[in-house]
Amino acid sequence: MSRLPRVHHRSIDIDGVEVAYRESRPDRADAPVLLLLHGFPSASHQFRGLIDALGADYRLIAPDYPGFGRTRAPEGFEYTFDRLADVVEGFIDRIGLHRFTMYVFDFGAPIGFRIAERRPDRITGLVVQNGNAYTEGLSEAARDFIALRREQPDAEATVRGLLTLDGTRFQYEAGVADPSLIAPDGWLLDQHYLDLPGRKDAQVALAFDYRSNVDRYESWQAWLREHTPPTLITWGAKDPFFPEPGARAYLADVPEAELHLFDTGHFALETHLPEIAPLIASFLDRLPAGH
């Protein structure tokens, strides 16, 4: 029988934001650290399977951002990607992460790359899973969504249409050959949190701020070229938002990256955890000494 990890569920105050997080604590004090940065509209619970698979041998840490999961932000919190990165950066400092690999998925990419620019010396490697940093990786639907402006008629209604149960389920099942492989727990729990007071307002604000990420793509690409971090790319090739070209685009800036494409959609871990988890374990084990 495989060893199951000991997983702690805690919260910590970061400048008035009560950041909830889950963390595996392996027996090895020197176990590699993997910071798991979740996507929209989910939270740290999206990594529960990965933590069960790898948490006995590696220290996996997954925070919930403000506006997501069990994290609680004060009234008046400004929901922008810069502010989310501020909170995650404060979280990293507070729990004492000095060297770590980042797993960036969806919203986790713009948050993680902001942190990488600010703290390049702390990043030992990248695991990129449908986390976009290239215009090539934006589908037509994604481009149309990012182009929405709050002042446009029906723009907010379009965003809120994505925040329904049907919209949340679509993000899990679109591009998936066999949706029966996806447990309903994930999208039902996501919707529970989306339906909490104020949460949809937070997501609307972030949707209209998403263009700030596209504006920074060139800067993140320059960071990748300068620092060439060890990189593992595991990508759901049928993602309706961030299609396969977004995965291949990384190879222009980190040509030594290891690329794996899977016949699935956006939430690749939901269908391909048995294939992806060993790739991550092997990648962490191969990082140079001191990483």
Image (tube, grey):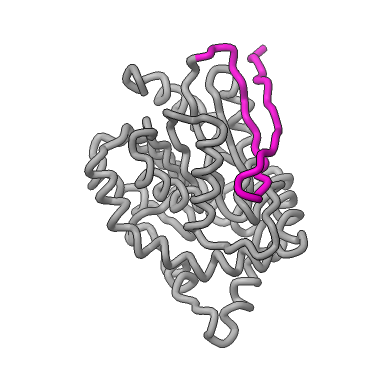
In percent of the image, x 66 and y 57: which residue is there?
A: 169
Q: Position of residue 193 (x, y in %)?
A: 73, 54
Q: Position of residue 134 (x, y in %)?
A: 33, 56
Q: Position of residue 63 (x, y in %)?
A: 60, 41
The span picked out in magenta is 1-29
Can residue 208 be spotted in the picture? yes
Residue in front for this viewpoint, 179 or 23: 23
To which quarter of the image does residue 174 belong?
Answer: bottom right
Residue in front for this viewpoint, 243 or 119: 119
To which quarter of the image does residue 229 belong?
Answer: top left
In percent of the image, x 71 and y 59: which residue is there?
A: 194
Q: Position of residue 105 (x, y in %)?
A: 49, 46
- Number of numbered callouts drawn: 0
Reply yes or no: does residue 81 show up in magenta: no
Can residue 181 be spotted in the picture? no
In percent of the image, x 41 and y 19: which residue is there?
A: 285
Residue in front for this viewpoint, 25 or 279: 25
In percent of the image, x 53 and y 43: which residue is there?
A: 90
Reply yes or no: does residue 6 show up in magenta: yes
Position of 178 relative to 34 (above/below): below
Position of 100 relative to 120 (above/below): above
